Image (cartoon, grey):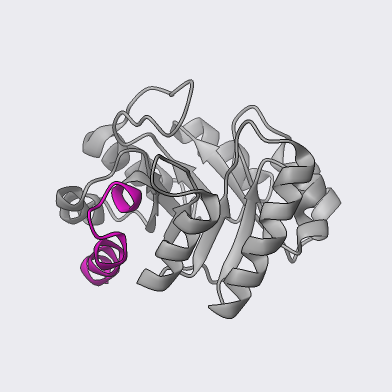
Amino acid sequence: MNLDNIQFITHQNSKFNYLDSASLALEGGIRFIQLRIKNKTEKELILIGKELKTLCDKYNARLIIDDYVELVNEIGACGVHLGLNDMPIKQAREILGKDKIIGGTANCYEDIVKHYNEGADYIGLGPFRFTTTKEKLSPILGISGYDKIINECKKNNINIPIYAIGGIRLDDLKSLKATNVFGLALSSIILESSNPIETTKEIINNWK
């Protein structure tokens, strides 16, 4: 499955709501959006999800949903992202079928192997550094963590797209790229920028 190598994860802050945040990323050129919403009802999530699906369709972008496997088809999303404490990848695959994207969160090599064996399409490996956009943060990896884990995957023929995630800044891109990580999953780097659209374009250009 061909995946875009930069994924935007929705978030809201004092300036932008979930839809605004995705709109900025799309306008900047990102074509892979993960709708992550916390502390909302299922009904609210469906409403926002359907609006975002319409927006993604306008840009010919893929939309996946964080956690809610049962809402993927109702919203019309391309798939789901599952955390370490969410539904197992294998179970989600049985529900959604082979054509939906299923991504899994990992913090170590063992997590990756488990997701890979259960049929995940990609891995969100992190956190790279401390981030305020995620609660209950796993141990921080840093560049050395990515180097070690990606080399271990290569050595054991675990071929799966791995996205770096967690507090990534513009000046991290060069060193992250050197680890041979497949892509980036981003949020705050864009939303906290003084010019989110231009920052998004800069990230895309620097990752080519």
Q: Please, is residue 86 above or below residue 147 in the view?
A: above
Indicate whether 65 appears above or below 141. Answer: below
Q: Which quadrant of the structure image shows residue 26?
A: bottom left
Give the dominant element type of the magenta stretch: helix, strand or loop: helix
The spot of residue 106 in percent (x, y) is: 50, 36
Residue appearing at x 66%, y 66% in the figure: 53
Q: Could you tell me which residue is drawn at 29 percent across and 46 percent down?
A: 192
Q: Is residue 91 left or right of residue 9?
A: right
Instruction: Note whether 131 is above or below 32 in the view shown.
Output: above
- Does the magenta segment cover residue 168? no
Question: Residue 201 falls in which quadrant of the image?
Answer: bottom left
Q: Position of residue 105 (x, y in %)?
A: 53, 39
Is 175 or 10 nearer to us in this picture? 10
Residue 204: within the magenta?
yes
Can residue 185 be seen here? The reply is yes
Q: Is residue 54 left or right of residue 203?
A: right
